[in-house]
Amino acid sequence: MSGSYSASEKAVDVELSETTALEMSNQPTTKVALANLEEQQSWNWFTIRTLITSGTGFFTDAYDVFIINLVVPMLGYVYFKETNGHMPAGTEGALKGIASFGTLVGQLTFGYLGDALGRKKIYGFELMIIILGTFCCAMAGSNAKGSSVIQYLTFWRFVLGVGIGGDYPMSATVTSEWASAGRRGQLMSIIFSMQGIGNLAASVVTLIVLAIFKSAIIEDVDNLDIVWRICIGVGCIPAVSTIYLRLTMPESPRYAMDVENDIEKANLAVARATDAAVSDNAATSEEVIAQQNTIAETKAKRNHNREFIEYFSRWANLKILIGTSVTWFLLDIAFYGISLNQSYVLNAMGFVGNGTVYDNLWRTTLGNLTVSCLGFVPGYWFTVFLIEKMGRKKIQFMGFGMLTILFTVLAAAFYELKKIIPLFVAIFTLAQFFFNFGPNTTTFVVPGEVFPTRVRATAHGISAASGKLGAILATFGFNKLVEIGGPTGQHAFLPQTLGIFAAIMGLGFIFTFLIPETKGMSLEEIEQRGIKVADEEESA
């Protein structure tokens, strides 16, 4: 590297050294406070509150995302009678995939704002957007001339997606920064596992509403217009119940200390999280003024864009972001390709009705519920209980490896396995299990802890948005890909598609080598290790 510096680079170095000097003067107080947080192992009310606040959001996210898989057949029967209840592939793809576009926008936007403005100022607004989007989806109507119900529903699902996307970086960073080193991965996994419960709840609610309206549906299929609105609208209930908790969540102690340099706020936050008494050592007026000046000066000098570019201009840091982003991208191609279009696989399993509208809907929903109970939900909870023992990287390697094998088997012996339905169901269930006891959980956890506080939310948002690019590709590509080589509705290319998924999972295994292990390490230790590695690589 060159030993010469430009005037602008010298100015940046002076600013950074001044900021570092200000931070060093407060190190003893803050280090003790954060040590108390890192050593906190007992479950107290604040821990439970954090789990409820963040977990309910992910429950709602999953419910709203996956309910569309059950609602689309109802929409087909009500609004597409001229095509025997089948929604056109293009319309279906847009309706299912538009939420992913919104999610991508929300992940990037809220991730950036979470770092630039702070967790407290932003956390809760994403849930407001989710409530608005869900309510408007349930109430979607049509014009006498012009826009249809499906078009309005598509628009509001985009809005819903923006809120869902915002929940990813915000809940991940909030949970990570309030957790101790020994159970941070477990708490983040619990938050993310609420996706499984939300998916399960979507099937349960749909079965209940179908059962209530059974006679009405058999008498007149147009009564499904009430059923699908109720199924979607239920998603508002958990979101509304926790909006107050989000809006009153205090600022993360790590953001207060590492970014705002507000020592008093950080200490108060740690005391609240650990049930510890706040120090009664009264500061002198001079100390108060000095700290206020330090905070003001830190905020005035901070430039998030510059911090982000500076941090990721070093290859040691950038390659980790590439690792978290590419693995999430590859994962979501297969995960959403299967999950959002699960009815195709369920039909292959034999979860088909007797031809009546009600029976078809009932059996499809029951099939989704069966898969959720057998593999989807248990996979999440295996991760919850084992992530602090096995580590993030080992679980991700195992998940990608097993998925590669399982999809290869499904692709190679698809038609033979269809003749042995219990075996087919078992293999597909195992695939769902290793999605969640594997990369679907770890790709969420790792970006929430491996980056420093000043860029954590932004980097998590970028990683998550990369995953949504994969989801978009799967959602819009799967519907057309499976129809190659046969008439519409036969899914003649499904075995080959599963083979493509196997290759993609193999690539995920390879890119996992780019991410570091964070098991048992505090956020400060992770950051210091990153600095050391980057320095060693640059000096080599």
Image (cartoon, rainbow, N blue to C red):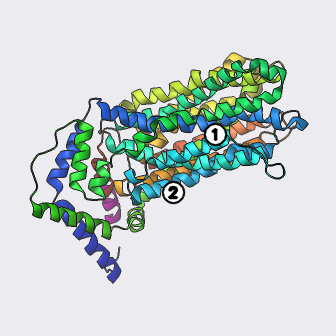
Residue wearing tag 2: 109
Q: Which residues are magenta?
A: 532-540
Name the front one of labels 2 and 1: 2
For mark 1, does the 10 Å Cα neighbourhood hold few (<14), some (14 to 19), or many (20 or more) residues?
many
Residue 276: give x, y in percent of width and height.
19, 37
Q: Main secondary structure of the magenta part?
A: helix
Q: Is residue 178 left or right of residue 427?
A: left
Residue wearing tag 1: 336
Please state which amino acid type lies under the numbered disc 1.
Tyr
Figure check: 186 above or below 11: above
Please state which amino acid type lies under the numbered disc 2.
Thr
- Asked whether the viewer can see residue 3, the reply is no
Task: State the residue at coordinates (21%, 53%).
Answer: 264
Task: State the residue at coordinates (24%, 57%).
Answer: 262
Figure check: 26 above or below 207: below
Q: Quadrant of residue 8?
A: bottom left
Is label 1 in a helix, a strand or a loop?
A: helix
Q: Quarter of the image for the N terminus: give it.
A: bottom left
